[in-house]
Amino acid sequence: MDNNFNTNGQQNSWQVPPSYNSNGYYNYGAYVNSEYYQKLEQKKKEKKDIKTIGKNCGIGALLYLAIAYGVAFVATILATIFPSFNVVFSDKTAIFAFDSVSSILALGIPFALVFVILKNKKLMKALPYEKPENPKAAGYLTLLSIPVMVFSSIIINYISAIIQAILGVEFNSNIENTKISGVIGVLAVCISIAIVPAILEEFVVRGVALQSLRKYGDKFAILVSALFFSILHGNMLQIPYTFVGGLILGYLAVKTKSLWPPMILHFVNNFYSAIVLIVTDNFSEKAGTYVTYVIWILFILFGVFGAIGYMGNREKAPLSEGESVLTTKEKIVAFIKNGPMITMIILFGIMAINSIAF
């Protein structure tokens, strides 16, 4: 039986029927020009391009890890050779300042290189640092996103605490304990915890990763960039809420067509955490609780005002499906199934496991 037909005599939809010309010879040109062949070639190209993006993002993450550990190693050596360095790094202000510089070097340089490579390969355009197309709608949506982002993190942390209690484990974070005071100290903490991550992580994730993947569908780009964002944090305490936060930040970036709203949202979320930590460490836990409640009320008001304003100014256009002919599963596999990305997932996964205290 002809391989193009099944046992019931019906043509198999997944095969291309042979095409013959008027002389009875196989018409290869007709096959090449067929819709099936064009779709097959488009699939191959999309898989190759997505794999290239995933590979470069994986290389960027591995360089980030290498530079971060390299900088820490050099600092340790200097502290060993020069005792005066021990005095410097015993000061919390100096530690947070060092963390800021280290983050800029470790995260900024590799992904600036990744951005240049992907841009040269024509896999992404310039990053959307211009103001949103609809500034009013973007502003309202950003205000609405603040309580959604903050309260989703709080809920996830509570769920995480319950899971830790049930399992009898503790998820440790790599966030420094503040115990810092003074104007310069507070400024150093805010820059390290709020400003630097808001700028750098949005450039890396909602900029390089998300923008390069949007061609293949906004939902896919938001999902994969959120996964990448959470894995980059490398500890079990932060992975769950950074994934959810990544979805919110990605949606905001796509809907506003600008990186400024997610940068602002990221800053507000981290700044809130920094302020509560500083107040608790320098005053009392009770004072920290009062500050927390005041901020929550303020955020709720932001959300209500933002929701009302956004309903009257929002664009009703749905998220773009892109021009991809691949399924979501095929796209995710293409992004992950490469040496650098697999290595990155393994190394950051080991870091996450090591953050669990049994």
Image (tube, grey):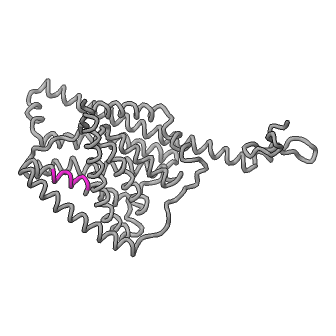
Residue 116 vs residue 291, the one in the foreground: 291
Give the residue at the far right of this rendering. Answer: 23
Using the rendered image of the protein, determine whether residue 153 is visible from the camera's viewpoint. Answer: yes
- Side (left or right) of 235 relative to 80: right
Task: State yes or no: residue 11 in magenta.
Answer: no
The C terminus, quarter of image: top left
Question: Outermost residue, front direction?
Answer: 166
Residue at point 24%, 36% (across, down):
170
Chief secondary structure of the magenta span?
helix
Residue 208 in picture, x, y percent from top left: 42, 48
Q: Quadrant of the N terminus?
A: top right
Please identify the quarter of the rendering in which residue 94 is found: top left
Q: Is residue 270 magenta?
A: yes
For the point 34% across and 69% down, the residue is 307
Magenta residues (range): 269-276
Measured from the top left, where is residue 150 in percent x and y? Answer: 27, 56
Above or below, comparing residue 147 to residue 213 in the picture: below
The image position of residue 117, as x and y in percent, is 46, 42
Q: Give residue 58's position: percent from left, percent from top.
A: 42, 37
